[in-house]
Amino acid sequence: MVALSYVFVVRWDLTDDKHYSLSAASKAMLKQTDAPIEVTLLLDGDLNAGFRRLKKATEETIEEMSVYAKISNLQSSISNRIADSLGLSPIIIHEREQNGKTAQTTVYPYALMSYKGRRAVVTLLKNTRGLSGEENLNASIEQLEFAFMEALHLLQQTETPRVAILEGHGEPDEAHTYDLMAALSKYFQIDRGALTSEGVESHMLDPYKAIIIASPQTAFSDAERFVIDQYIMRGGAVLWAVNGVRFSEQVLQSDGFTPIVALDLGLTEMLFKYGVRVNPALVQDIQCLPIPVNVSNDPQQPNLQPMPWTYAPLLLTSQGSPITRNMGQVMSTFVSPIDAVGGEDGIEKRVLLATSTASRVTGTPGEVDLSDMNPEMTDFKYQYVPVAVSLEGCFASAYAHRMVPEGVETDEAIRKTGVKTRQVVIGSGSVLLNETQKGQVLPMGYDRYSGMQFSNRDFVTNAVLWLTDSEGLISLREKSVALRLLNDKRAHDKRTQVQLISTISPVAILALIGGIVWIIRKRKYEK
């Protein structure tokens, strides 16, 4: 029996949230490894309770991974030297002790994973703006499996998949999409190029796992729409970041106002067929970014003061999608609302980004005026207006009952129904663009006026990973660990009582059980 226990190991995870279990995708990935994996944990030293919990959860994750692959778990005693050599920034923790003094601890929340001579850094700690320390630690524990599997996925890759950013329709230049390419280049080879309307080959997009359409300003030709449609029918994935309204930021800055009209990109019928409609309107939101406004009456002495700009909403993220789970707000400007259509089309639709509980919608034709800084709150009567959605399923072709457009080279019939694939539609190109300042590229989601960093980079990266995810890796983000926090005040006030109960109760219970057993045995054998 003892010998059998060494051969057959049975594990049961009795926790409600399956905290100690790996997903099927993780198990499959680990079983595919054909060489030892070495994990070096840099999270060490004099840690507080929260980071000790993170360290323990990390070690448990590594232990669970070792059931399905050969893994060596090493603890580094020189974390600072290793981290410094790799350019990893530490976390400085400031804590107030019971005597009132402040203690400072340097923590390196990283692990290094090595496989077949290659090495990847695993970031253990998420630091999302707007979440408390406990919530960030809990989110970090939820994402441990994904963090390690993502690193292993990159180490196992023998060929880098390709993603294309389409051009040719007035899209922003490379300087304003630089951070987008930098974020995705960790996972993909990024190509840029235009679809021409002359001599278009219908399979020209097939080498790409996904394509990105980023804020086009001019209409797509019939031939270009056909190529994209048939690419989707063959299983291609698309990230659409398209505005429903045409406006001019240059005119707004110079004149103080700009007219807004519907932007016709020739994509309305196509997107409607896939299950969404980008409306020719703009959302305004009380929860928004500030912009500097000159409130001085003296032109010689300007007085710039931050004022809320309701056309730059801070978008809420959905907890119901692995793309946006545990993610902070996303920065945006001039965003169009999105409607889901075709409820019986079999397409799974999820809202990814939405406005707050105090929003309004401005239709076209209309006007955006810089003097509109103090709108009436009663006008903001809409709640949670969707501005980004994900689509998954077998899409119907927009060319199902049409001829192949002139100029398209194809040797096969039009595919009327596609294989299962995914799309993401965003009602603004601003979400995935970055600004520049004095020739320097700023990160996606960085507001230079307030100095705040929002979650645009994570959102766009997760969206493209979800679009191209054939192994189910991004689904690991759906794992949830319940956050069970102590009442700090009650724990402090009743500290002595809790300590006495927790130390005396086990001894008393054992003594009681021992006494009962002794009495039973005495009565039994006295007879």
Image (tube, grey):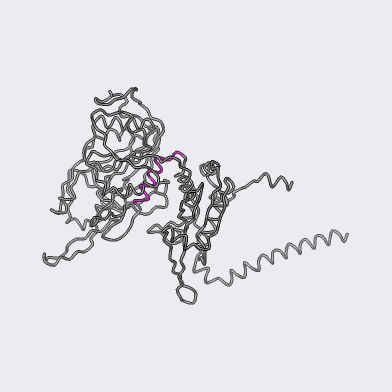
Describe residue 460's horizontal placement relative to residue 194 as left or right: right
> Where residue 395 sits in the image (x, y, percent)?
37, 32
Whether the magenta-drawn stretch holds residue 169 is answered as: no
Nearest the camera: 330 or 78? 78
Give the extent of the magenta segment.
456-470
> Where residue 479 sits in the image (x, y, percent)?
48, 48
Q: Is residue 184 above or below residue 299?
A: above
Q: Please, which residue is most extreme toward the bottom here?
A: 99
Quadrant the C terminus occupies: bottom right
Describe residue 485's horizontal placement relative to residue 356 as left or right: right
Q: In this orientation, does residue 87 appear?
A: yes
> Where residue 331 sits in the image (x, y, percent)?
30, 53
- Residue shown at 28% from the left, 38% from the top: 193
For the image, the number of numbered tags is 0
Quadrant of the image occupied by residue 454:
bottom left
Quadrant of the image occupied by residue 240:
top left
Quadrant of the image occupied by residue 394:
top left
Nearest the camera: 410 or 383? 410
Q: Please, which residue is most extreme toward the right here?
A: 527
> Where residue 118 sits in the image (x, y, percent)?
48, 48
Nearest the camera: 77 or 411? 77
- Residue shown at 77% from the left, 61% from the top: 517
